[in-house]
Amino acid sequence: MELWDPQHTRLTILFDPGRIKRDLKPHEEMGLPLRTGKRYRLVIDRTWRDAEGRPLVRAFVKSFRAGLQDRSLVRTSDWRLTAPRAETRDSFIVTFPEPLDRALLMRLVSVRDSSGAAVDGDRRERARDAMGVRVAYAMEPPRILVARRH
C-alpha cells in the first residue's frame, strides 16, 4: 500500500514501530532505523508511476542527514500567536519554538470564530529559521475579520 496525500505530492514512509518505540525487542536488538548524524539517500526509481499512472521521466534522489531525535511533546502553550488587526485581511500568524510537521499542521490546526465555525483562509509558510526549517505559518482570511475579545 502506498500512502500518498490526496494531491499525490507527498508520500508517507513508515518505519517498523518496533524500531521506534522504546522497550520493544526490535528497538533493543537493532536500534532506531535512522542514526543521528548519519547520511542517507531516498531513491525513487523511474519505473514508479506518477498520479496519472505513467512512469516517471527520471529517478528521484533525495540525500539527507538524520538529525537529533525529538521525543518531546508538542506544547501549544509555547506557540506564539499574532492576531490580525481588527477589520483587516491581515494574516493570523502562529510561530513555533521548533519545526513541526507541515502536513499535520495543515490538517489538524484551524482557526475558529466565536461560534466555533472554521474560518477559511489561505494557510502558508511564513518564515524559516537559520537552518531553513519552517517555524511560522500564516492564515490569510478571505474576508475582513472583526476582532472581539474572547
Image: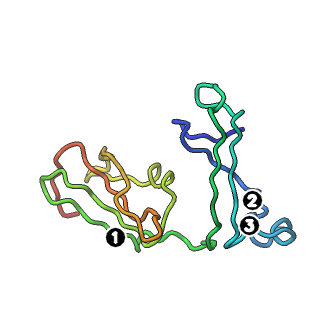
Residue at 38%, 52% (x, y): give it.
Answer: 110
Give 77 or 102, whichever is nearer the viewer: 102
Instruction: Give the label on residue 80, or none.
Output: 1
CA distance separating discs 3 and 1? 30 Å
Residue 52 higher or lower than 136, as above or below: above
Residue type at numbered disc 3: Lys
Secondary structure type for disc 3: loop
Instruction: Give the label on residue 21, or none.
Output: 3
How many labels were placed on the picture? 3
Image quarter in which the N terminus is found: top right
- Please report whichever mark, 3 or 1, sits nearer to the chain's N-terminal start: 3
Does the CB distance between marks 2 and 3 fall below 8 Å? yes
Secondary structure type for disc 1: strand
Give 47 or 114, whichever is nearer the viewer: 47
CA distance separating discs 2 and 3? 6 Å
Pointer 1: residues within 10 angstroms few (<14), some, or many (20+)? few
- Residue 50: x %, y % from top left: 61, 31
Where, by quadrant of the figure, is residue 46 drawn?
top right
Residue type at numbered disc 2: Pro
Residue 116 higher or lower than 127, as above or below: above
Secondary structure type for disc 2: helix
Pointer 2: residues within 10 angstroms few (<14), some, or many (20+)? few
Residue at 65%, 67% (x, y): give it.
Answer: 66
Residue at 32%, 46% (x, y): give it.
Answer: 122
Give 33 or 79, whichever is nearer the viewer: 33
Instruction: Give the label on residue 17, or none.
Output: 2
Residue 128 higher or lower than 54, as above or below: below
- Residue 78: x %, y % from top left: 41, 74
Residue type at numbered disc 1: Arg
